Image: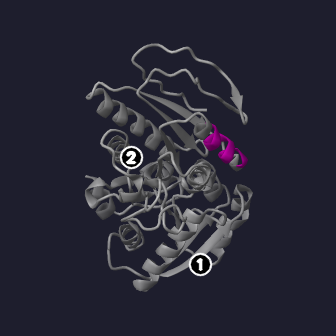
Amino acid sequence: MRKKLLIAAVAVVAVAAIVAGVLGFSACSTADFTIGIALPMQHDALGMAADTFQTELTRLLEADGLTVEFDEQNANSDASLYPSIVNNFVNRGYDMIYTLGTDISVAAATATQTIPVLFNAVTDPVEAKLVASNEAPGANVTGVSDLNPIDEQVGLMQMLMGNGSADFTDFKVGVLYTLSEVNSQVQADSVQAACEAKGIECEQYGIVDINALNAQIPAMKSDGVDIIYIPTDNLLASNAATVNAQNKSTGTNLPIVCGETSMNALCGVATISVDYGTLGEFAAQMAYDILVNGAKPAETAVKFSAQEDLAYSIEEDIAAGIGFTIPDAVKELVA
């Protein structure tokens, strides 16, 4: 479990309790607001969106003389714990539930129709049935999407494969993702559509668990894949170092572009993506409006990243490890 951040006007007595296999939280709170934070697993990007949310919301509330306590719980990749975690938040009567990722957000939305549920890192909230529409969510649930800049990422792959040319199309993309993750399927479909619109060959390769990598990665090369794209897939993000190891140990050595920068730093050669630290700040601003200004989640539009909020990752060491040369034109993107 990641460290829990507690901010209060005065010290409170911590009462430990085991709830569904995770550490409970003190019911004795003197803070103005209490917020439950639900994480599905140990995950660098989601953890960043949780941390910046806490830091930014604390700052905003302190400026008004208000205090907040956060109860952060991590399911550690055990989906069976999602209902227990969010129901515990509901039973304790927290002022808000902040969720990271699609499935645990759905669990929270199912658990309460009254407490505001603020999600983050959900690629397609409408597809996940969390909101009626992104513009008008329609219930007690709203939040922040981590929809990636797919067109820019496909353009980056063109530059990587075409020695810097943004018009190069004579290559094949293999999209590696986890079959059970709705977010990943949405992104896989979007990447395939974007590639095919440009005349780039693209094929999807779904896995059921991480053990399938040893066979799947070399199979992609045998199929003629030239570059691998991995969306913001939770399973693959939490095993990004394994992806890199399998890519090298099997002799596949294909360049990889990941959906976000923290996983790209462990297995990819380059990417352009949303910044999860910024997404956490977006969520904090939305939480402040709901808790302090009385904004209604039903009328609070889902937030998306703008072009100026995107982050870049160029990983020359990983590229060198697979014998791939990053074109100068790509390096200049972050110069």
Q: Position of residue 90 (x, y in %)?
A: 59, 40
Q: Which of marks 2 and 1 is nearer the N terminus?
A: 1
Up-down: is 294 above or below 250? above
Mark closer to the observer (2, 1) = 2
Q: Which of 258/127 is in front?
A: 127
Give neighbour class at mark 1: few <14, some 14-19, many 20+ (Cα, 10 Å).
few
Asked whether residue 289 appears in the rendered view, the answer is: yes
Disc 2 residue type? Ala
Q: Is the magenta stretch mostly helix, strand or loop?
A: helix
Q: In which quarter of the image is residue 272?
A: bottom left
Asked whether residue 302 appears in the rendered view, the answer is: no
Q: Where is residue 143 in the image (x, y as percent from the top left)?
A: 42, 53
Give neighbour class at mark 2: few <14, some 14-19, many 20+ (Cα, 10 Å).
many
Q: What stretch is highlighted in magenta?
A: 80-88
Q: Position of residue 202 (x, y in %)?
A: 53, 79
Disc 1 residue type? Gly
Residue 7 appears left or right of 227: left
Measured Cα–Cα span from mark 2 to mark 1 = 41 Å
Q: Quadrant of residue 31?
A: top left
Image point (37%, 52%), residue name: 296
Up-down: is 140 above or below 97? below
**Disc 2 designates what residue?**
283
Disc 2 to disc 1: CB gap under 8 Å: no
What coloring was used for the rendering?
Answer: one colour
Q: Does the magenta stretch include residue 115?
A: no
Image point (65%, 65%), residue name: 217
* Helix, strand or loop under label 1: loop
* Helix, strand or loop under label 2: helix
Q: Which quadrant: the N terminus?
A: top right
**Disc 1 designates what residue?**
224
Q: Position of residue 269 (x, y in %)?
A: 45, 57
Residue 212 appears left or right of 108: right
